[in-house]
Amino acid sequence: MSDTPLNLLLEDGPLLAVNKPPGLLTVGAIPGVPTLERQVKDYLRQKYQKPGNVYLGIPHRLDRPVSGVVVFARNSKCADRLAEQFRDRTVRKTYWALVSGADLPDSGEWTDWLLKAPDEAQVRVVPAETPGAREARLRFHCLARLPASDPATSPRSLVEIELDTGRMHQIRVQFASRGFPVCGDLQYGSHEPFGFLPVTDLRDAPIALHARQLELKHPIRYDTLVLQAPLPEAWSALTATLPAEVLAR
């Protein structure tokens, strides 16, 4: 992942939007481990000839195996205004996911209570009265149903999801808990690999979850921005089978 070029979607004043590839950490503190944050800082350092430390505000993140839109800020005022939008849930977040199973409803709204396991990057659905549990809400619409491509795979559904909350692993655990794990997500019950990218570390392996679009206010002008990320290479086998009207969404 360290050799993956930066896929810049937008640079508008102090705001940057990047299409994160799967398998790359958004941020990280371990020296030598590639992160999207370091890629963006290197880009800014070279473009603006900044020899020292480069400021970069990070108002949100994506899980390591997830791809899609991530926004950054080049100054603290922009960072504060973006963080406020995410905190107040005024950012409209749209994801695409390929999940196992063809009997998913055409559309729906799900509310669950999620609890992070102590000292683990793992979340589970729990009763609402569980101490420490946090409410998680999403809405979804099925875009396409795909038959099994061979005996080793199951039928799949391509789903468009809008998050009303932004909990850790929310989409992954809410779908998996109902028997529709995200393809490639071994952590939450998938038994099917996703994509054909060569990886030497399973943590680099992509899952079929993509932050397709963010709709937010520009932190300086306050006009509405719609930032859309093309699907990454790991989705190429799927996109070849999808109708044009689906890909145009």
Image (cartoon, rainbow, N blue to C red):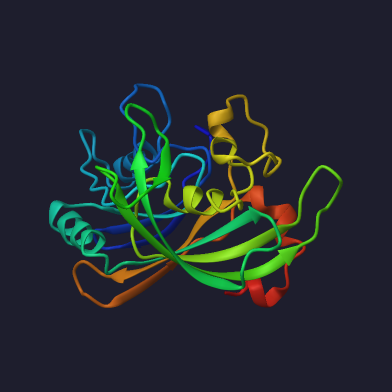
- Residue 67 shows in the view: no
As drawn, is 43 to the left or to the right of 245?
left
Image quadrant where one finds the C terminus: bottom right
Image x and y of residue 19, in percent: 47, 53
Residue at 22% in and 59% down: 87
Q: Could you say which is closer to the camera, residue 91 or residue 105?
A: 105
- Residue 240 shows in the view: yes
Query: Against 37, is 136 above or below?
Result: below
Residue at 71% in and 57% down: 156
Image x and y of residue 209, in percent: 54, 52
Quadrant in the rendering for residue 50: top left
Query: Against 199, is 245 above or below?
Result: below
Residue at 56% in and 73% down: 107
Image x and y of residue 69, in percent: 43, 57
Image x and y of residue 170, in percent: 42, 51
Residue at 63% in and 71% down: 143
As drawn, is 72 to the left or to the right of 64?
left
